[in-house]
Image (tube, grey):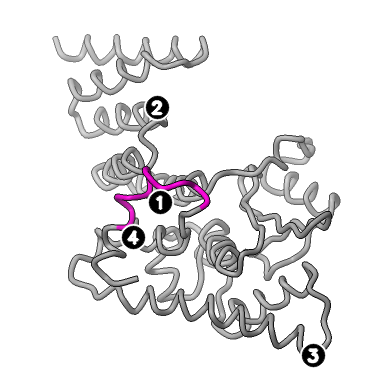
Amino acid sequence: MQEKDLRAYSATLASLPDEEIDLAFAAISLAAPKYPQRVLERYGHHIKKIYDDVGMRHAELLKAGAEDDLATRVAALKHIIHDKYEYVGDKETYDSLQNANMIEVIERRKGLPVAISILYLAASHAQGWSAEGLNFPAHFVIRMTKNAERMIIDPFNDMDILDAAGLRHLVKTFIGGEAELSANYYESVSRIDVLIRLQNNLKLRLISIEDYAEALAVVEQMQKVAPREKRFLLDQGVLFAKLDEKRRAIEALESYLEGDINHHDKHDVEAFIAELYRSLK
């Protein structure tokens, strides 16, 4: 993909069929506005090289006598992405903004679970393999499928293959000792949802350092990628309020209330709007 196409790619995501989205190129494109002077083509070349190398490694394994099963596919992915290019989960500086920015992930060869998973998902899709992110809470994992065979894998932790006990351990680690597995944790998420999860991590890190203007820019970027997602209006309203743009906050929040939301959320948002109106007097 040429640099001009890579920069413009995020603007096309809302109109693309989900299965046609290249997650790695999309994540680079979402990060691109922060680097107006940087040449992006080399990042596209790097991603394409990963795709080609995974395909060649898989072919080598088959030629050496390996079965074309999920274990062989996982081995090819891990050999190239983890072993050759040295991508790892960043456990030391987990909360760094850089870990949710795909350009910095490529530069540093480390990132958040969802960022590292995007590389594995995109490389799998480039081979025509079935791979998807899961609706797992607080930690991102992927599932690969071939015919009746399935594997749930943790790219952040060196492509660990997770059984029910491993998944239960993750739930208890990230949610709490009383937490248990739920059927909806096994549900697949769309490629757009994977990108939203990446950008949400960036937004939350920006909010934590009180950079509300940049957090708002991330939300507005996500609105363009997923225009039907009304939850972004709530984020937008809260961030406008943080920036003391109260009328714009009210407008966003009232638009959010026009959607289908639960009673508890509606009550809280109405109370917040009333507070904003009182502060204008």
Helix, strand or loop for disc 2? loop
Query: Badges 3 and 4: C-beta atoms under 8 Å apart?
Result: no
Horizontal side of 108 relative to 166 (left or right) equals left
Q: Amino acid at mark 3?
A: Ala
Q: Which mark is residue 29?
A: 4
Foreground disc of the pair 1, 4 = 4
Give, as a single range, the part of the protein colored magenta: 9-19
Helix, strand or loop for disc 3? loop
In the displayed structure, 141 sits above or below 244; it is below
Q: Image quarter for residue 143? A: bottom right
In the displayed structure, 93 sits above or below 60; it is above
Give the residue furthest to the left. Answer: 281
Image position, residue 94 (x, y; %): 52, 61
Image position, residue 45 (x, y; %): 39, 79
**Of callouts 1 and 4, the N-terminal one:** 4
Q: Amino acid at mark 4?
A: Ser
Image position, residue 172 (x, y; %): 75, 45
C-alpha distance separating marks 3 and 4: 38 Å
Image position, residue 247 (x, y; %): 17, 20
C-alpha distance separating marks 2 and 3: 51 Å
Foreground disc of the pair 3, 4 = 3
**Of callouts 1 and 3, the N-terminal one:** 3
Which residue corresponds to the image point at 47% horizontal and 58% vertical from the top-left?
Answer: 23
Q: Which residue is mark 1?
A: 202
Q: Which residue is mark 2?
A: 230
Q: Which mark is residue 121?
A: none
Q: Amino acid at mark 2?
A: Lys
Q: Chief secondary structure of the magenta span?
A: helix
Which residue corresponds to the image point at 66% horizontal and 44% vertical from the top-left?
Answer: 136
